[in-house]
């Protein structure tokens, strides 16, 4: 596999670049594009889902964005060191009935030497909101 810069060990600048790249990819809502940032054998914990490998990542994201309509995400760097980055995030979406939600959470990431994410652990909580209370448009 080709390197996927920026590469670890991360500086504050390169950690912020990695976070922004992840935010941009997830906001594309393109599961195949998102999956390319992860190792072939990536391991995730997303809420109560345990995901192994890029194929499961793509399947998971397809299901997610079928249910979470008009998804919009903002990630913020929380901490970094070596080959690890921690982020906090918020995202908004609505379901097929038109009910809006805002999700809050934290992610812990670990990268391989080529800059691909090997591990992603996410803790997430949802809050029902009114459309008028949306932050991300």
Image (tube, rainbow, N blue to C red):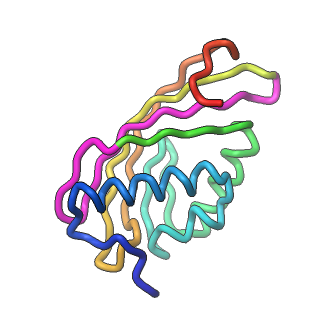
> Percent from the top left, x then y, of residue 76?
37, 41
Taking depth in this image into account, of 137 and 88 the one nearest to the observer is: 137
Start and end of the magenta stretch? 77-97
Q: In which quarter of the image is residue 62?
A: bottom right
What residue is shown at x 40% (from left), y 53% (from top)? 19
Taking depth in this image into account, of 23 and 127 the one nearest to the observer is: 23
Task: Tell me which secondary structure the magenta stretch mostly adopts.
Answer: strand
Give the number of marks. 0
Taking depth in this image into account, of 90 and 13 the one nearest to the observer is: 13
Judged left or right of residue 13, residue 33 is right
Judged left or right of residue 53, residue 19 is left
What residue is shown at x 55% (from left), y 53% (from top)? 24
> Percent from the top left, x then y, of residue 116?
40, 71
Residue 83 in magenta stretch: yes
What residue is shown at x 44% (from left), y 42% (from top)? 75
- Against 133, is 67 above or below? below
Name the outermost residue toward the right. Answer: 97
- Against 120, is 68 above or below? above
Name the outermost residue toward the front. Answer: 13
Judged left or right of residue 67, residue 27 is left
Q: Quadrant of residue 115?
A: bottom left
Name the outermost residue toward the bottom. Answer: 1
What residue is shown at x 57% (from left), y 52% (from top)? 26
> Percent from the top left, x then y, of residue 130?
67, 12
> Percent from the top left, x then y, of residue 127?
54, 19
Q: Quadrant of the C terminus?
A: top right
Residue 39 in magenta stretch: no
- Against 86, is 71 above or below? above
């Amino acid at each position: 596999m080709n390197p996927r810069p920026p590469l670890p060990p991360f500086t504050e600048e390169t950690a912020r670049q990695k976070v922004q790249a992840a935010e941009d990819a997830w906001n594309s809502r393109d599961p195949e594009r998102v999956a390319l940032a992860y190792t072939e054998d990536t391991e995730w914990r997303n809420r109560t889902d345990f995901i192994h490998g890029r194929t499961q990542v793509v399947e998971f994201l397809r299901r997610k964005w079928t249910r979470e309509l008009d998804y919009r995400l903002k990630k913020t760097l929380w901490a970094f060191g070596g080959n690890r980055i921690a982020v906090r995030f918020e995202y908004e979406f609505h379901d097929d009935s038109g009910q809006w939600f805002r999700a809050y959470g934290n992610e812990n990431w670990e990268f391989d030497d080529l800059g691909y994410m090997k591990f992603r652990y996410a803790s997430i909580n949802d809050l029902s909101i009114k459309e008028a209370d949306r932050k991300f448009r």
